[in-house]
Image (cartoon, grey):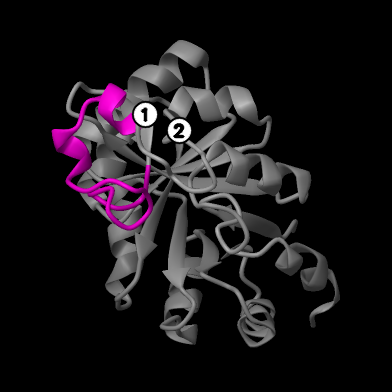
């Protein structure tokens, strides 16, 4: 089994999160997969940003959904970077991607891009929302999906199966052996997030998870030697 090291919003521990600069750095660091977040702008552009508003990660204020792409482009997303759209990321890096969607509307917009650009083999889709996972699965035959859990119980395994997900991405601070064993019985892959310390990486290895999402590229190198 190949252990996956996933770059969280690129390498957000060292570069501005969810920017082309961060994604290129993740690729150069040799991370196996790059995770990013998608929202829809006021005019329907599929933009890459984690929060529902721009306040934390740019020099602007206000909800993404109330801004046009032109307005979002005018913002500084860190170190002079601009807020990218999803297709710019596709063109900027060659790495496989894990795209997190926040709702059904984003699922439908992403589905259009995935079908048009034949991205089933390159892009895995993740979400905290069961209905978004089910919708992208309905729209894009063969898409790989992952259900994310932060505060969760054993029912997350049943939810993932019902939504058609093949992976669960679980908060490493709340993961339990019970959930791991249930996921294994359901033939689900298991990713731990966010893994930024050696203790967390040792836990990932001890539980024999399939991968780890991290803010720091160093985890990729040290992970090879962690038992």
Taking 66 as reference, is 12 above or below it? below
At 80% from the left and 72% from the top, the residue drawn is 222
Quarter of the image where one finds residue 49: top left
Q: Taking 78 as reference, is 202 left or right?
A: right
The residue labelled by disc 1 is 73
Residue located farthest toward the right when viewing the structure as drawn: 225
Quarter of the image where one finds residue 91: top right
Magenta extent:
49-72
Q: Taking 175 as reference, is 58 left or right?
A: left
The one nearer the camera, 127 or 29, is 29
The one nearer the camera, 37 or 51, is 51
Residue located farthest toward the top when viewing the structure as drawn: 116
Describe the element under mark 1 as helix, strand or loop: helix
Q: Are marks 1 and 2 in contact (CB under 8 Å)?
A: no
Q: Taking 200 as reference, is 59 left or right?
A: left
Describe the element under mark 2 as helix, strand or loop: loop
The residue labelled by disc 2 is 143
Q: Is residue 62 magenta?
A: yes
Residue located farthest toward the left when viewing the structure as drawn: 66
At 72% from the left and 68% from the top, the residue drawn is 219
The one nearer the camera, 193 or 134, is 193
* Residue 120 in view (yes/no): no
User: Residue 81: x percent and y percent?
Assistant: 51, 39
Name the mark on residue 23: none
Q: Is residue 175 magenta?
A: no
* Residue 74 in view (yes/no): yes
In front: mark 1 or mark 2?
1
Quarter holding the C terminus? bottom right
């Amino acid at each position: 089994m190949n252990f996956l090291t996933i770059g969280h919003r690129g390498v957000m521990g060292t570069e501005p999160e969810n920017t082309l600069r961060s994604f290129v750095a993740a690729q150069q660091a040799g991370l196996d997969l790059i995770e990013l977040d998608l929202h829809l702008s006021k005019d329907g552009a599929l933009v890459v940003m984690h929060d529902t508003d721009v306040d934390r990660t740019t020099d602007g204020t206000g909800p993404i959904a109330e801004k046009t792409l032109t307005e979002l482009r005018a913002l500084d997303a860190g170190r002079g970077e601009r807020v990218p759209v999803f297709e710019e990321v596709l063109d900027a890096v060659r790495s496989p991607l894990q795209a997190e969607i926040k709702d059904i509307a984003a699922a439908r917009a992403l589905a259009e891009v995935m079908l048009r650009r034949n991205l089933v083999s390159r892009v895995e889709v993740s979400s905290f929302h069961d209905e978004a996972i089910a919708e992208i699965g309905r729209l894009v035959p063969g898409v790989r999906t992952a259900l994310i859990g932060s505060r969760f119980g054993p029912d997350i395994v049943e939810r993932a199966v019902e939504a058609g997900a093949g992976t669960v991405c679980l908060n490493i601070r709340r993961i339990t052996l019970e959930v791991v064993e249930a996921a294994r019985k359901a033939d689900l892959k298991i990713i731990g997030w966010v893994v930024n310390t050696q203790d967390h990486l040792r836990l990932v290895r001890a539980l024999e998870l399939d991968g780890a999402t991290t803010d720091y590229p160093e985890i990729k190198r040290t992970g090879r030697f962690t038992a």
